[in-house]
């Protein structure tokens, strides 16, 4: 039985940075899809707020252009688009000054949910929080949505948490990690905690190891300046990969509720063993074709920033003692492929004579492409010739199993924004989680700096540096192939 969609109440959503790249590519097209899905009440409003001098009509034109460019097939519904645009407004504000704040205050409706999306650089988060309060635009029911990066180390993340806490309670702060809005990531929890089958096996008695791969084919071109100060560890591992690790490894929460889930995730991060630097491989993409060199993309010919990281870590608790977790992420790899594989242990004893092959059950959760889940099982190879065994996947590609519109064609951002309006923080990071994640990654990054570590080069279109393959080979294991 399918449960019903939870409706949202009327809201005013202010997008600071409403003319920026993220708003144009993700937030506004996503909100249009929610409008098409009947999830945006008629009197709900979206208010763009940014530095550009625009009126409502000019902003609506800009948004129409963005939706046409990034909105996919749905954008062709021009009649719906023009109805959606009527719910949009624009205010010119200066996050650091006084301009525009009285206009914004005057525009807000009383008695509706107020949400403020900080889609601006992190240097402005504190200014926005302060001014929302100063001008009495935010009330106790208001919510703020904060984009990544949430700090660049423990110290800056802590300072940011303290600044936001001056004006907002933790229950009002939604730190967004769009990975948690992905259908498959949520399905990971549904599979683990909605079936009797997996949880009894989800421990060091049955699991040999776990792999998490987030591979991208794109480079850093276009955001080279930003990325070069960040690198894969800060940009991907500290947030997205660690969130995936938490969901895979956490204990069952007592209920699917924000703090119950986040308490369990936090315990995982706190139980992470510090990683020895021999267990980490850093890489930087390189190719004879100059356009594909990291250093050219980053515009720093001597950059030592990593565009790839692979590491092995352990979680110090009863459930996972002795089970390695291997994580890797990188840019300009051979395919865009994100997945988590839970590799179960070998059978203790095979009853099938002549079957020397190693048969393993592997549960793979595919985040992209072809979102879905498959379970590798061993069966008899069909036909005569005796009892020969073969491994085949029990495949549940969501689009095949539930139809192409199984999730209404929605994207992670729009699902998470609707959760903000509903007041559901389950899929958002809590301040202490973010700080704990930095506490674990900081020593790794600091160690690289102290040793003046130089990343290993890897070929564009490869699976990363050779050393990352060795990380598993040394343990008698191998990575799942990165394939589209
Ligand atoms: P952007 O540079 O394209 O847009 C910045 C926006 O902020 C513009 O609308 C600009 O008018 C507004 N702005 C800048 N200074 C301002 C000021 N003083 N007062 C009021 N408004 C001001 O940036 P972006 O790519 O849209 O990124 C926004 C945030 O989202 C950043 O924190 C970024 O790290 C994060 N983010 C972006 C992406 C992405 O794909 N673009 C992905 C993840 C996270």
Image (tube, rainbow, N blue to C red):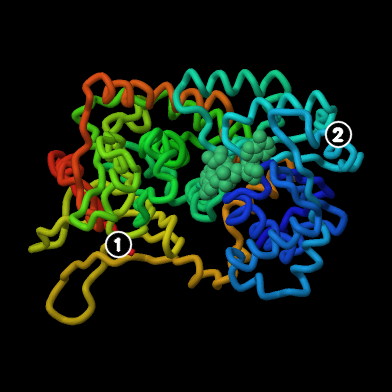
Screen quadrant of the N terminus: bottom right
Mark number, residue 483: 1
Q: Is residue 365 above or below residue 295?
A: below
Mark number, residue 443: none
Please state if 443 lies on the left or on the right of 79 as rendered: left
Query: Which element type, helix, strand or loop, lies under badge 1?
Result: loop
Residue pictured at 91% horizontal, 39% vertical: 110
Q: Is residue 30 above or below residue 188?
A: below
Q: Residues within 10 Å of mark 1 (few under 14, many from 20)?
A: few
Q: Are marks 2 and 1 in contact (CB under 8 Å)?
A: no
Depth check, mark 2 against mark 1: the one in front is 2
Query: Which element type, helix, strand or loop, lies under badge 2?
Result: helix
Ligand 1's quadrant is top right
Q: Where in the figure is residue 293, as x and y percent of width and height? A: 26, 50
Residue bearing mark 2: 102
Q: Where in the figure is residue 291, as x and y percent of width and height? A: 29, 55
Can you see residue 135? Answer: yes
Q: Residues within 10 Å of mark 2 (few under 14, many from 20)?
A: few
Q: Nearer the viewer, residue 59 or 464?
A: 59
Residue pictured at 78% horizontal, 62% vertical: 85
Residue pictured at 81% horizontal, 34% vertical: 101
Q: Where in the figure is residue 181, as x and y percent of width and height? A: 56, 49
Q: Is residue 18 above or below residue 274?
A: below
How many numbered markers are drawn?
Answer: 2
């Amino acid at each position: 039985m399918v449960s019903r969609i939870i409706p949202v109440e009327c809201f005013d959503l202010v997008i600071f940075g409403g003319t920026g790249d993220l708003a144009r590519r993700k937030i506004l097209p996503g909100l249009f899809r929610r409008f098409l899905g009947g999830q945006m009440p008629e009197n709900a409003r979206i208010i763009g707020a940014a530095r550009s001098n625009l009126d409502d009509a000019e902003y609506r034109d800009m948004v129409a252009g963005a939706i046409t460019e990034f909105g996919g097939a749905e954008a062709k519904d021009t009649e719906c688009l023009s109805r959606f645009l009527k719910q949009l407004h624009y205010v010119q504000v200066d996050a650091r000054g006084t301009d525009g704040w009285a206009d914004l205050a005057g525009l807000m409706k009383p008695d509706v949910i107020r949400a403020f999306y900080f889609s601006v650089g992190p240097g402005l988060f504190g200014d926005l929080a302060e001014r929302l309060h100063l001008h009495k635009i935010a009330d106790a029911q208001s919510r703020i949505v904060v984009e990544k990066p949430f700090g660049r180390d423990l110290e800056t993340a802590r300072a940011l948490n303290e600044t936001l806490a001056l004006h907002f309670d933790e229950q009002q702060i939604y730190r967004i990690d769009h990975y948690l809005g992905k259908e498959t990531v949520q399905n990971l929890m549904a599979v683990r905690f909605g079936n009797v089958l997996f949880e009894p096996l989800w421990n060091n008695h049955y699991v040999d190891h776990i792999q998490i791969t987030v591979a991208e084919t794109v480079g850093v071109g276009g955001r080279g300046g930003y990325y070069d100060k960040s690198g894969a560890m800060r940009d991907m591992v500290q947030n997205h990969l660690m969130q995936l690790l938490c969901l895979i490894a956490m204990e069952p929460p007592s209920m699917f509720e924000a703090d119950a889930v986040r308490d369990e995730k936090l315990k995982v991060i706190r139980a992470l063993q510090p990683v020895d630097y021999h267990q980490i491989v850093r890489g930087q993409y390189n190719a004879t074709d100059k356009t594909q060199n990291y250093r050219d993309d980053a515009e720093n010919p001597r950059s030592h920033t990593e565009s790839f990281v692979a590491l092995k870590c352990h979680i110090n608790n009863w459930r996972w003692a002795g089970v390695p977790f291997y994580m890797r992420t990188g840019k300009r790899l051979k395919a865009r492929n994100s997945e988590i594989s839970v590799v179960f242990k070998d059978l203790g004893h095979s009853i099938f004579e002549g079957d020397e092959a190693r048969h393993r059950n592997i549960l793979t959760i595919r985040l992209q492409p072809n979102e879905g889940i498959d379970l590798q099982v061993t069966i008899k190879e069909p036909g005569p010739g005796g009892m020969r065994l073969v491994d085949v996947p029990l495949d549940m590609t969501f689009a095949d199993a539930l139809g192409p519109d199984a999730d209404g064609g929605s994207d992670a951002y729009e699902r998470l924004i609707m959760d903000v309006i509903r007041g559901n923080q389950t899929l958002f990071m809590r301040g202490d989680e973010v700080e704990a994640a930095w506490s674990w990654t900081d020593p790794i990054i600091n160690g690289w700096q102290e040793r003046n570590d130089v990343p290993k080069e890897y070929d564009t279109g490869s699976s990363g540096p050779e050393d990352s393959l060795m990380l598993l080979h040394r343990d008698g294991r191998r990575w799942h192939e990165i394939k589209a």
